[in-house]
Image (cartoon, grey):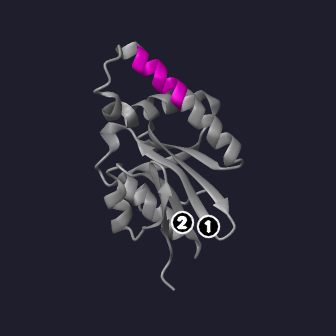
Amino acid sequence: MPLPLVEAAALGVALRPMCDADLAFTTALYASTRAQELAPVPWPEEAKQAFLAQQHAAQHAHYQQHYKGMDAAIVERGGTAIGRLYLYDMPGEVRIVDISLMPEARGLGLGGAMLRDVLAAAAGRSVTIHVEKNNPARTLYARLGFTILDDDRGAYHLWEWRAAP
């Protein structure tokens, strides 16, 4: 589902297809989403970075295996990569496989604008996303009308948004 940006485009956000050359960026992006979680761990910084790189590689392999054909996009603003948005089309459903932004791009309304663009483009289909139970973005998903569909998924909840009838 190539996503037409409207609201996010008005904020200077653009999407481009991800390529292998973006793996260094997505590794750094992944690490930025885990920095707070690893902060209290008494490992040397090099060990933390090696661990995060390994975790990113495992996540990337999982996405490639379980979401073949997903639309993997790099989020850019002003020509600079600031995040990623991975979408997967399924019958009757759009799965947000991943949406994440670098720390300097968080809290500016960009993620919310991209999510509203996803919801607008869903064309009557539901939109789902797995969200970690301690992810602060839960409040954003709730404001957008997502509800927890399945709360028995370990560290994650499966959230769902449905268009109004």
Residue bounds of the magenta highlight: 47-55
Nearest the viewer among 147 and 15 is 147
Q: Which residue is mark 1?
A: 93
Q: Are marks 1 and 2 in contact (CB under 8 Å)?
A: yes
Q: Secondary structure at mark 2?
A: strand
Query: What main secondary structure does the magenta stretch of the protein show?
Result: helix
Residue at x 56%, y 45% (from the top left corner): 73
Amino acid, disc 2: Val
Q: Secondary structure at mark 1?
A: strand
User: Image point 40% across, 71% down: which residue?
Assistant: 145
Q: Quadrant of residue 83?
A: top left
User: Viewed as shown, does residue 41 lie left or right of 157?
Assistant: left
Q: Position of residue 158 (x, y in %)?
A: 50, 59
Q: Which mark is residue 16?
A: none
In the orientation shown, which residue stands out farthest toward the bottom? 165
Q: Is residue 1 visible?
A: no
Where's the N terminus, which quadrant? bottom right
> Which residue is found at the position 63% from the left and 39% from the top?
62
Residue bearing mark 2: 127
Q: In the rendered image of this protein, does residue 8 appear above or below residue 143? A: above
Q: Earlier in the sequence, mark 1 or mark 2?
A: 1
